[in-house]
Amino acid sequence: MKSTVFNKSYQKILRPASSSRVDFISPFCILLLGCIGVLFIYSAQTYSGGNLWKKQLFWLSLGVIVYIAVSAINYKIFMEKALWIYILGLVMLLAVFSPLGVTLYGARRWINLGIMNFQPTEMAKIATLIMISSILARSRIEDFRSSVKVLAWVGLVFSLPILLIFLQPDLGSTLVFPPMVFALLYVSKLSERFFVTAFALFLLAVGVVGFDVYRYYSFLDERGISPRQNTGLYEEHAILPLKDYQRNRILAFVAPELVDPRGIGVAWNGNQARISVATGGLFGKGLQQGTQAQLGYLPQSVAHNDFIFAVIAEETGFIGSVFIIAIFGLIIGNGFRIAGKARDQFGMLLAVGVSVFFLVHAFINIGMTIGISPITGLPLPFLSYGGSFVLSCCILQGLVQSVYRFRKDFS
C-alpha cells in the first residue's frame, strides 16, 4: 500500500517528457541565444586571446542539464518547499561575508567553492521569486486591510535579500527585484491604493537619490575635487549608503559633462559601447571585424559580459541587433503566454515573475549599451559570460517549462 502511494506521489513530481507537454518555443530560443553568446564571447576576446568562450560552452551545457531536470519536476513542489528554498538563498548570501567570501573588483559578491567562484545573488533572486509567489498564492486578497497584511509579509521577504545584496555592494542586481515584485503584486489584484502609494514613494525615492547625487557633486566642487578621482570622501557625509563610484555612474548618465567631460573616465565604457552600436551600420562589420572590441577600445574586462550586445551590434549591425531583441521578445512573450495557460495562482505567478526578470535584464543591459539607462552591470541572459548567471537563467526557464508541462495536473 505504501509503495503504491509512493509511486503515485513520485509520478506527480516527475513526468517523462512528451510532445504534447513540452513547449518548444523557449528552449529553441535559449539554445539559439546560447550559441550566439559563445560565438561573440569568442569574438570579443580575439584581441586578448582569452578562452572564456570554452568556459561559457561548459556552463551552457551544464545549464541544459539543469533546465531539463527542473522542467521535469512538478512546480507545485517548489511551493511546498518555498520557505526552505528562501532560507537557503539567505544563507548563501550571508556566506559571502564569511571566510568563504571572495572579493573581486572591489566587491564581495562571490563564494569560493574550490573549483569555481559562485555568485549567490542569482540563486537569491530565484528563492525570492518562489517565496513571494508562494505567499501570494496562499493569500486571499479581498480588501485594503488584507492587502496590507500580505504586503507586510512580501515586504519582509523582499527586503532581506536586497539588504544583503546591497551590502556587497551590488546595486545593479537590486534593480531586478522591485519590477518583479510589483508585477507579482499587480497580477495578484492587490488594492489600487497600494500602487498609487507605491508610485508616490518611487517618485520620492528618485528625488532622494537625485538630491544625494547633487550634494555629492557640490561637496566635491567646494573642495576642488574632481569626481574622476573617486576619493570616497563624501561617503562619510552621505544621506544614502551608496559608493562614490555608483554616484559617478549616475552622474555619467544624467550629466556626463560634469563627471567626465573628456569621456576618458567613468563614461568611457558607455561611450565606446555607443560607438560600437552606431558604427555597426545595417549589416555590421562582420565577425571579429568590430574595431571597438578588437582594438581594445571597448575594454576586454566588459566586452564579453556587460557589453556583449555592443559587440554583437557592431559586428552584425542593426539587423543582428533587432534579431537578438526579437528572440528576447519571443522568450518573454512566451512566458506570459504560459502564465495565461496556468491553472493555478502559483504557476501563473512563477511564469510572470520569470518573464519580468528577463524583461528587466534585457531592457537595462541593452539600454545601458545604447545610452538610455545608467550603467549598472546587469548581464544579458544567455549572451553575457558568467557561470552563475547562466545556471540561474536555466533554472528560471526550467520553472516556466514546468508550469507548462504540469498545467493539466492541477487539482
Image (cartoon, rainbow, N blue to C red):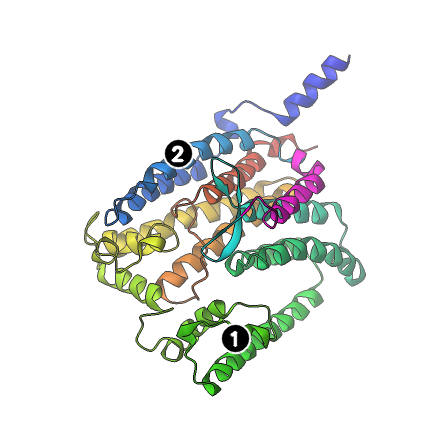
State the image coordinates of residue 411 (x, y, percent, origin top left).
70, 32
Q: Residue furthest front?
A: 99
Q: Which sits in the foreground, 410 or 72?
A: 72
- Element class at badge 2: helix
Location of the N terminus (image quadrant): top right
Q: Which residue is mark 1?
A: 233
Q: Residue at x 32, y 50 (%)?
A: 323
Mark nearest the camera among 1 and 2 is 1
| Residue at 69% from the left image edge and 19% from the top image edge | 8
Question: Residue 370, image x and y in percent?
Answer: 35, 64
* Span highlighted in magenta in the image: 77-101
**Which residue is labeled 2 in the image?**
58
Where is residue 334? Give x, y as percent. 48, 44
Quadrant of the rendered image containing residue 34: top left
* 76 versus 126 height, above or below: above
Residue 101: x %, y % from top left: 56, 47
